[in-house]
């Protein structure tokens, strides 16, 4: 690794850091790097940086590295890190803000997670809940693997675990209104 001038890095990434903090409501300096978040993260083994390290990258002005990381895309938002944090740093919200910023900058480095994320939210916006079969089909087609897990469909259909027809909640218009408000506030509303 090349030597790094931290004060210059901090200054150059100030805007990114402020955007991520504003979007997540998390003050990055609240983290004192105890590592409890990473120790309890169920998907940390598959991440390139642990959650603690992503915060450290942001603290050191290495925001571009955080945006390039796979970690925010793999975050399951399970809240294990948040419940373990002695400073109540809401890491799932921070990871979502980093994902949104990466998406805004065209730096999506885990396309499949992004495809699933968008397909899931489109289903929720359309029906008020996830339509599993439609979600699977949309994800498989957009990710270029149309027959992935296709052999699982017949048993799931026969057991009534998935339905070919979507079920809507009573007030889908209220859910659509939530998405509209998010878009009005600058969210990408995917």
Image (cartoon, rainbow, N blue to C red):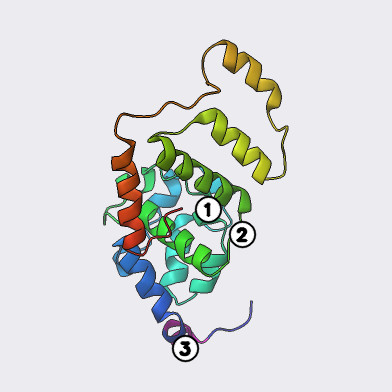
State yes or no: discs 2 and 1 in contact (Cβ < 8 Å).
Answer: yes
Please say if 94 is above or below 7.
Answer: above
Label 2 or label 1, whichever comes before in sequence order: 1
Residue 130 position, x and y percent, is 45, 33
Q: Residue at x 52, y 14 (%)?
A: 160
Cα distance in 3D space between marks 2 and 1: 8 Å
Q: Nearer the viewer, residue 10 or 25?
A: 25
Q: Is 46 colored magenta in this rendering?
A: no
Cα distance in 3D space between marks 3 and 2: 26 Å
Q: Is residue 169 visible?
A: yes
Which label number is shown at residue 8?
3
Q: Residues within 10 Å of mark 2 (few under 14, many from 20)?
A: some
Q: Is residue 84 visible?
A: no
Query: What residue does disc 1 label?
Result: 73
Q: Residue at x 41, y 61 (%)?
A: 97
Q: Residue furthest top?
A: 158
- What's drawn in magenta, residue-wise? 5-10
Helix, strand, or loop for circle 2?
loop
Q: Nearer the viewer, residue 24 or 141?
A: 141
Q: Residues within 10 Å of mark 3 (few under 14, many from 20)?
A: few
């Amino acid at each position: 690794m090349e030597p790094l001038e931290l004060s210059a890095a901090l200054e150059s990434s100030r805007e990114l850091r402020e955007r991520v903090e504003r979007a997540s409501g998390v003050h990055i300096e609240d983290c004192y790097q105890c590592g409890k978040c990473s120790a309890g993260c169920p998907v940390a083994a598959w991440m390139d940086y642990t959650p603690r390290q992503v915060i450290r990258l942001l603290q050191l002005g290495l925001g571009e590295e955080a945006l390039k990381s796979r970690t925010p895309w793999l975050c399951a938002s399970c809240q294990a890190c948040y419940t373990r944090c002695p400073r109540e740093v809401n890491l799932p919200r921070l990871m979502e803000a980093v994902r949104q910023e990466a998406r805004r900058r065209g730096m999506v480095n885990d396309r499949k997670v992004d495809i699933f994320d968008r397909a899931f939210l489109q289903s929720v916006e359309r029906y008020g809940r996830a339509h599993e079969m439609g979600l699977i089909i949309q994800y498989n087609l957009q990710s270029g693997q149309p027959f992935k897990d296709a052999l699982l469909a017949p048993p799931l259909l026969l057991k009534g675990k998935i339905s070919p027809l979507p079920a809507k909640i009573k007030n889908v218009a209220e859910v659509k209104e939530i998405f509209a408000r998010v878009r009005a506030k600058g969210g990408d509303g995917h």
